[in-house]
Image (tube, rainbow, N blue to C red):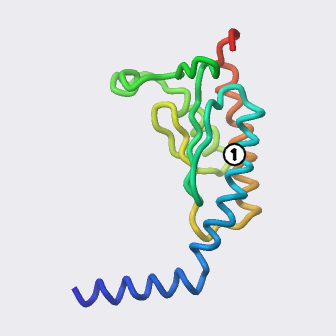
Amino acid sequence: MRIEIRREKRMSIAYKRLRLIERSRELGHYLGKRLKSLQEKHRSVGDVRGMGLFWALRLVRDRESKRPFNTREDKIEGRPLVVHRVASECMKNGTCILSWINQLIVAPPLIIEKEEIDQGVSALDNSLKLADLEVSEVS
């Protein structure tokens, strides 16, 4: 018990010393604006939402109907998912993005720098072209 209390106290001191909460708020605002600009550019991005440095992009086949590329059943059955292809392409370009059914999760470390956000968003921008190719012509 004592060890955990000391560890929590050290972590709290580090958070304050490095201004991690404030940085998360400031850089999160910047990251959010950059990710929302991808929604305007890519037809496959149906929604962008988040807070601080934790964001998600929902990929859709059709923006108007919000029809998803894949379903839970696709995941359970082991079918190829569009988000996995996008995340894999990001990884090839040095950016780790988590993928889940129709969501891309963007959650960089709290110590990230603005230039690194720009690099990551640029890699994501290029990778989203794969999903755009799958978008229904009707949208």
Look at 57% across and 55% down and name the residue there: 51
Figure quadrant of the C terminus: top right
At label 1, counting other C-alpha atoms closer than 10 Å, the crowd grade (few under 14, some 14-19, many 20 or more) is many
Give percent across and percent down for residue 2: 25, 90
Q: Is residue 138 left or right of residue 55?
A: right
Figure quadrant of the N terminus: bottom left
- Number of numbered discs visible in the structure rendering: 1
> Which residue in the rendered view is the most extreme toward the left?
1
* Relative height, residue 109 to residue 7 (above, below): above
Residue type for callout 1: Leu
Depth order, front residue of 15/92: 15
Q: Is residue 68 left or right of residue 111?
A: left
Give percent across and percent down for residue 73: 36, 21
Look at 60% across and 20% down and name the residue there: 61
Look at 70% across and 10% down and name the residue there: 137
* Relative height, residue 25 to residue 11 (above, below): above
Instruction: Say which quarter of the image contains residue 66.
Output: top right
Give percent across and percent down for residue 54: 55, 55
Q: Label 1 belongs to which residue? A: 35
* Relative height, residue 40 to residue 133 (above, below): below
> Which residue in the rendered view is the most extreme toward the top?
138
Q: Secondary structure at mark 1?
A: helix
